[in-house]
Amino acid sequence: MTSTLETPTLHPDVKRFVQGAPLRLLIGGRRVASRSEKTFQTMDPATGEPLAELYEADAEDVDDAVAASRRALEGTWGNISPAERGRLLWKLADLIEEHAEELSQLESLDTGKPVTETSMVDIPQTVDHFRYFAGWTTKLTGETLPVSFPGEYLAYTRREPLGVVGAIVPWNFPLMIASWKLAPALACGNTVVLKPSELTPLTALRLGELVQEADIPPGVVNILPGYGPTAGAALTRHPEVDKVSFTGSTAVGREIVRNSADHFQRLSLELGGKSPNIVFPDADPDAVAGGVMMSIFFNQGEVCAAGSRLYLHQNIYDKVLEKVVERAHTIRQGPGVDLTTQMGPLISETHRDRVWGYIQRGKEEGARVLAGAERGEGKGYFIRPTVLEGRDDMEVAREEIFGPVLTVLPFKDVPDVVKRANDTPYGLVAGVWSRDIAKAVRVAHSLKAGTVWVNGYNMIDAASPWGGFKQSGVGREMGPYALEHYTEVKSVWVNLT
């Protein structure tokens, strides 16, 4: 494949941004080189070639960014009115919307995902999140308390910002998940040090430019592209970081919990998943087939909520499976910025090899290949959409693969499938397909998952909470539930006697 930067439809501002030498950190309202002046490259997943060069943040840069955040918190940002915070967040949302085409293409280049997805999901959701939480700035109220302590008192509560927030976002939805953390944190009056993944830092840095253009005061948002073991670890261990919000793997989540122990930082963690997608015999086979495509092959299957375990009732098993396999064979792969691409490459060579290893071990364990299980052609990190017929005890049915690999499993009745669906350390999401809504709701209530979708998949909204049970995480993002994780409740007593 030729360089995707030569794509004729690529926005000129994307080329300008990507080809700028080396891209700088944002600290205290200034775009600066890292203290060490070390740089690294982000790669184009569609070609395996370097895409851009960036300065690499390290522990010293984290110190600078946290100090800048603290100054802003105790200065300009801490004294700004709630209404003005809301106005600035809304202005930032307007700027993101104004630059939607550019940001969609930049996200597609860096992640490999289809630009049709970034333009229809990632960027609109980012805008919606900033606007949703902009509306909350003037509604963070406390309450008066009917205390019974002897005497006469005015007792009330107030919600105050936690302080400096360390936000660590993954590579699969870089800008959208950044908004899940930035928008509520800023709405509540906190300041933020944002560390994007080293694999996909470009839209975070472009967002930093828009933050400045929106006139958000210096130091309120600081952006540090760098590696997890260095910049990420320094952020989670920093004594002046009051809260860490992390989205990523369960293994890294455990490490962050350990790192936070010395200073008792507040934590919210959105982690892994191995989500069941359950189809009953009265479901519409065509609707199910389309939903399955969305559940597992959207974003190349690089989704924590991917419906990677498809439970088909034995009475509808063959009919639905035939439709799923047929559609998997027709998915068109290519560079994400190509408008005809339906599924892009995986994020990196390392991750492609990891996914490929799961496929090979699945075959060794006896899984039957119904579609895919092939590498793509060219230098990019492609794997064909893969459908495996397997068993619950197989590695491909138990571990999070984070790629376009679907394991299909038959079931006989409700108790059988609920027990098997819940037999996992994860509990992020689940899907249920049935025309019998009463049955679907009963199953939804029985599943150990933070979100259950009935007759659909991958529906998200800024007003609806997001997070998992068990090892899929701690806390919730989105909706008013997120505000609880970015504020402290203070109780005030006034003696009136």
Image (cartoon, grey):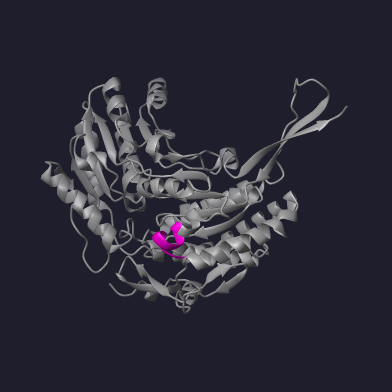
Quarter occupied by residue 150: top right
Residue 289 pos. (x, y %): 30, 40
Q: Looking at the image, which residue is at 67% across and 60% down?
A: 72
Is residue 384 visible to us here?
no
Asked whether 296 or 337 is in front, the reply is 296
Q: Quadrant of the C terminus?
A: top right
Question: x%, y% of residue 46?
Answer: 31, 66
- Work out which quarter of the rendered image holds the N terminus and state it: bottom left
* Residue closest to the far bottom: 21
Picture residue at 53% right of the left edge, 45% below the top: 264
User: What residue is rendered at 39% in x and 40% in y?
Assistant: 472
Q: Depth check: 265 or 221 in front?
A: 265
Location of residue 186 in the rendering, given as x and y in whole percent from the top left corner:
63, 52
x, y percentage for residue 187? 64, 49
247 above or below 341? above
Q: Nearer the viewer, residue 254 or 149?
A: 149
In the rendered image, residue 415 lying in the magenta stretch gets the answer: no
Along the line of sight, the residue nearer the viewer: 412 or 161: 161
Please provide the residue range marked out in magenta.
Answer: 225-233
